Image (tube, helix red, strand yellow):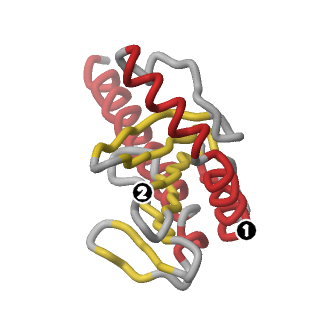
Amino acid sequence: MKLKKVYAVIGIIVVSLLIFHGVWYVNQKAYEPYCEGYDLYFTAYGKTTDQAQYTVSLPKYPQFTGNVAIGNLEDTLAIIMWPGLFAKEIKEYGVTLVDQGIGYEVYVDEKMNYLETKKNQFLSDERETVEQLLEQHHAELVNMRELAKGEWGL
């Protein structure tokens, strides 16, 4: 009787591990269409066009989240987008803003507006600067978001 319980526990562990690895593998494979025509740079895929720089980072084991990103050619603006499971739609957006050599990373909504979230933790003067930079670069960010939609369909 005791031996049957041990086998049952081992069986449950093995099945759970197989399910976890299967879902992880299928999730990672879902990112591959976004990498077509890109070059592999160390841990991410990327390409540069005359309008922008595009990168795709596949989920690293054992994580389920990768990202796609688009940046301007001057390396002063970038939008990072985190797809949900199986990379079907974007669940979260972030923007990197570089102003006078200082970089700010901020979570934004789909329309590239400042997002009230616990993840955006700035001092009051930093928040003011970030909101001003977002407003100043809003048109370029929206254009970059549209380029990303055209590139990946997300």
- Relative side of 143 to 78, left or right: right
Above or below — where is 103 with respect to 145?
A: above
Instruction: Indicate the amino acid at tag 2.
Output: Thr
Looking at the image, which residue is at 54% across and 81% down?
Answer: 49
Res. 76 mark: 2
Image spot of residue 150 (x, y percent): 73, 68
User: Residue 127: in sight, yes or no?
Assistant: yes
User: Residue 85: in sight, yes or no?
Assistant: no
Q: Nearer the viewer, residue 95 or 3?
A: 95
For the residues labelled 1 and 2, the Cα–Cα distance comes to: 21 Å
- Relative side of 114 to 1, left or right: right
Mark closest to the chain's N terminus, 1 or 2: 2
Badge 1 element: helix
Residue for badge 1: 150
Image spot of residue 107 (x, y percent): 51, 33
Image spot of residue 56 (x, y percent): 47, 64
Q: Nearer the viewer, residue 62 or 41?
A: 41
Badge 2 element: loop
- Quadrant location of residue 149? bottom right
Image spot of residue 88 (x, y percent): 68, 52
Q: Nearer the viewer, residue 61 or 91?
A: 91
Q: Nearer the viewer, residue 131 or 5?
A: 131
